[in-house]
Image (spheres, rainbow, N blue to C red):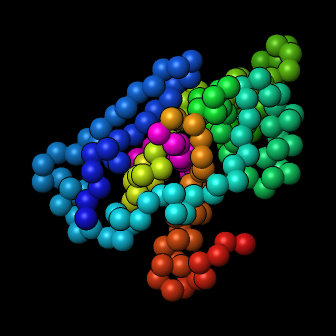
Amino acid sequence: MRPTSRTSRQHIYRGQGEHVVREPACEPNDPIETATPTIADTVPVSWIMSRDVVCARADLEVDAIVDLLVRSHIGCLPIVDHDGVPIGMVTKADLVEQLLASREAPGSGPLSATHVMMPLAFTLDEHATVAHAAAMMCLEGIHHVPIVAESGSLIGVVSTYDVVHWLAANDGLLTASRE
């Protein structure tokens, strides 16, 4: 069963209310379109996403971001607006890169999420499939995908770990629980 076009749209939030919806770029006879469907094409990403999401506002200072990432044992921090809509992402790798760059150009005062975040969040809606999440991660070179409700507000995050764990559990190699 192939997903409908409604579930295969890529929602991109560029901040300050700008929202872009992009359809998949598959040509007729593309291997992606002619591939044999798998269970990942039918399982909603909402089944495997982490629902207990730590997120922050754009004005949160970098020291607090570091503390949140370390204390919460997470690899990314979605940055949301006042409505809970993702407007960016801060990852550990991006944070280290920005902090090293700021050492070379000191003097602007304390840094906030606005200074270190990726200023857009590649998101999927809750009806997208596990296959959509895996494809987006591969195509965009990311390890975390925020999952949004129809309103655009953040309801979960799927990581590469979530996808890999689900695959192994689905094949009977692991138990379904994650701890």
Residue 85 falls within the magenta-colored stretch: no
Q: Along the horizontal axis of the image, is 91 left or right of 148? A: right
Between residue 106 and residue 159, name the one nearer to us.
159
Left or right relative to 13: residue 94: right
- Total numbered badges shown on the rendered structure: 0
Position in image of residue 128 (x %, y %): 41, 52
Percent position of residue 92, x then y: 71, 44
- 173 with respect to 63 (left or right): left
Residue 76 vs 85, above or below: the answer is below
Residue 63 or residue 103, whichever sits in front: 63
Please identify the quadrant where the C terminus is shown.
bottom right
Which residue appears at 44% of the width and 60% of the height? 44
Q: Is residue 74 above or below residue 43?
A: above
Q: Position of residue 31 (x, y in %)?
A: 20, 58
Residue 64 visible in image: yes
Identity of the residue furthest to the top in this view: 108
Q: Quadrant of the N terminus?
A: bottom left
- Residue visible at 64% across and 55% down? 51
The answer to whether residue 138 is seen in the rendering is no
For the point 52% across and 63% down, the residue is 47
Q: Is residue 147 magenta?
A: yes
Residue 113 vs 66, above or below: the answer is above
Q: Which residues are magenta?
A: 138-150
